[in-house]
Image: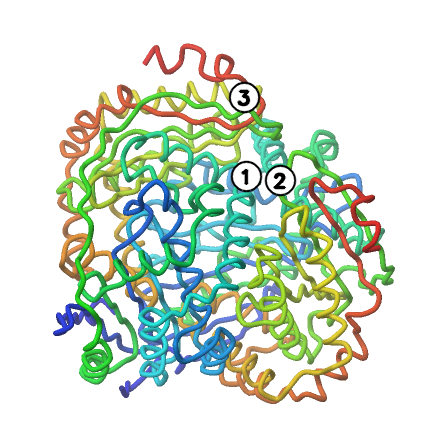
Amino acid sequence: MTTAITRQDSRFYTHQLPNGLQLLGQQIPGVNSVATVFWVYTGTRDEPQQQLGVSHFLEHMAFRRTKHFAGDQIDRAFEEMGADHNAATGPEMTFYWTRVLSENIFWSLDVLSDLLQPVLDPQDFDQERNVILEEIARYEDLPTQVLLDHFMDDFFGPHPLSGRTLGTPDTIQALTVEQMRDYWSRRYGSRNVLFAIAGDFDWDAIVDRVEQLSESWGQGETGRGLVRAPFNPAFEVYQQGQFVQEQLAVGTPSVSRGDHRYYVAAILATILGDETGSRLYWAIQQRGLAESATAQIMEFDDNGVMLIHLATEPRLAAEALDVARREMERLQSFDVTPDELDRAKAKLESSVIIGGESTNERVMGLIRSWLAERRLETLEQIKAKIDAVSLDDLRHLLEEFPVMPGQVTTAVGPLSSNDFQGAR
Amino acid sequence: METSDVFESKLLSSGVQVVGQPMQGVESVAVGFLIGTGARDERPEQFGVSHFIDQMLFRGTERHDARQISEQFDGLGISYDASAGLEMTLVSAVLLGDKVGQAVNLLCEVIRSPRFPEDAVEDVRNLVLQELRQREDQPGQKVMDTLRQQFFAGSPASHDVLGTEETIARLTRDDLVQYWTDRYTANNIIISIAGNFDWDQVLAQLERTTASWPAGRGRIEMSEPVPRSGITVIERETTQEHIGIAFPGVRVADPQFYAASLLVQAMGGSSYSRLFQEVREKRGLAYSVQARFDALEVTGMFRVYVGTSAERAHESIEVIMAELKKVQETGLTEDELTLAKTRLKSQVVMRSESTSSRMVANLRSWFFEETLRSLQEVKDRIESISTGDVLRLAQTLGITRNLAAVALGPESEQDLFGRVLAQS
């Protein structure tokens, strides 16, 4: 079927406002929706150690009261415009997003931008503290979250990337609204914010509106201390008898964000541990040795991790881990075939194009491009990059970032460290 | 995109029903095969057989072994999935339009000629047993599943998709083959295609490919269950108390289906909803509180979930109960209804931009009502609901008379529910 114009026939825009705020846009033909994101370059790694969790708590406070809106007015406005909306905090960012029908874009911008100007009322603060404590409690009941927290500790040690996004009950109890206000005024300046939009919109009008809306914002500070964390192989077991299954994370260093070999690393992770058709899939998941056996790349400004996750039964955990290590050994000794590489490329390329049809995914894609490259890439350019990856590229990357012999392994579940004695 | 609501439908000579929606401006196409069978059709000794089979389909066919099948899908960049639910089994793929012919052939092959290799049966058995145990580590999921099982106890609607440890341990290859032979037949299959494809071409291909499929019987009739009220408490050493409350809903084809959808939207579908405002925003009792409405072929169910620490659990339940009582007595305000309509309509339009969402929406629509609905028709139906409709619905359902609750956590039944449910 031939179509005159498709979502791939997009137009891309970038613009920096005089106050330093960077704008990115992709106009996608044929859609009715528009997705927008305000991305603040601040997260857990930027927090003073005693104030662990302040970024995430601040993200919650944004919905409590802003310069122009009370909390229920914010909730109501998003409801009135029929918006999907939310916010998230991570080690390196805090972002606020909406997806609306394009007729509501300006209204959505008014409210979304105001979330970056919270009032931080002390009474709201005390009440929202309870919600944060409940969120921490909720995490403690989710084995994969518990695993990830421990793994980041084990992998990054004293590096700021090991910090827990939600904070701890102690840091949250101790945090004051003044500390939060100080953090906000340092980190939420216009120079430290990225705005991205994807879908159906008029670029010039968007630039004007965002410029007006951000006129009074402070400039704040930018940047963060970057350093690659030293790699110290380790094997840590956290026995938690309340869980039924055993969760394992196995990590080795990989490319950091902005490294031009990102797609080389992504292809390695696909070959080793994509959810279907990968080496771990055949050797572990398909044999019933683990319910889940996957690999992925986690990228940060100054670090990267090739992370393998296994969710398995306690009695099979040692065997599943052993098989996973053998697969990593096999990858390291390098027996990847041209067919295997081609299949991984076909999978990645097709997911880039299909994902490119969603305004939500595209808006995040713009941000990824900008963070990694300081420019926007079309889907065709991304495809070409994937296509260019060779077996030699894979081999060279493994030489620089070996997956064997040293790894950081973290286990959470009913097993004790004695149960892993043979595996250490 | 709203103008591109072009539907096609055709009953093939084999008895297979095909529905299609060519969409402008996209490169992707989503293809889904719905087999009209799921946990509700299983006899007690077979519990879990539908899901067991969905895991076997890709493990080898008469022509290809598991690896060859997977390599074909991957090589073409086709992502695929198979999952059995309570009422239906869905086998689907998302791909670029130029591969649609190959994708259709591959899906037909795995659905109609699986080989059920003996060794794969053992692997899948281990995998499903692990899934059952994994759920014990997902308290929210565990509570919601247990709630449905309790609410519909004695009816096929109570069956657990995963089966039980006992049935999964005992199912044999013969059991699987027999169930598959009986249920995976032309009269019980609907195929849906949405996105970038040529209807006439795909239809001709399907007519040829399915010609030899046995007609078989259609769906197994199910009578309307009588919901059971009651409380179940699963004492567990979790950090939070996880609580689910259910009350009756309506079936998919019910004229009040959209009244029910709007009711749940206003009660617990967003941050402006009554439960979110009362439980989280005003009182800080919980991080996670939500309501959902699930409509089945012959019945339906509302479920409310809250996860909160032990000392706030009782109060959370009281607040939720007060809100349920209130909505039963007075329904929704004009204002709330208008907001819920805006939100629901906006979601319908935004979701329709995705080929997968359209494919699934059309499958469900045909499965439950033998019709396809345009976005305009759906929007008109939502618009036609009045506050009177919602109030009548809330009263007819007898919310507070027909409640069931499940709690998982450290607290006892007395401490959690005390006289709360009885008082209402």
Disc 3 from disc 1: Cα separation: 23 Å
Disc 2 from disc 1: Cα separation: 7 Å
Q: Say which element carries label 3.
A: helix
Horizontal side, residue B331 vs residue B413: left or right = left
**Residue B200 seen from this side:** yes
Local crowd size for mark 3, using a 10 Å CA cut-off: few (<14), some (14–19), many (≥20): some
Above-or-below relation of B139 to A219: above
Instruction: Examine the image and state in which quarter residue A280 appears.
Output: bottom right
Above-or-below relation of A414 to B174: above
Q: Residue A137: which numbered mark, if any?
A: none
- Residue position marked by numbered label 2 in the rendering: A244
Q: Say which element carries label 2.
A: loop
Query: How was this image coloured?
Result: rainbow
- Amino acid type of the residue that numbered disc 3 sits on in the rendered structure: Arg
Above-or-below relation of B208 to B423: below
Pinpoint residue A195: horizontal percent, then vertical percent: 54, 63
Q: Are marks 2 and 3 on the same chain?
A: no
Pinpoint residue A188: horizontal percent, then vertical percent: 64, 52
**Residue B258 seen from this side:** no
Q: Residue B312: which numbered mark, if any?
A: 3
From the viewer's side, name the closer residue of B150 and A410.
B150
- Amino acid type of the residue that numbered disc 2 sits on in the rendered structure: Val
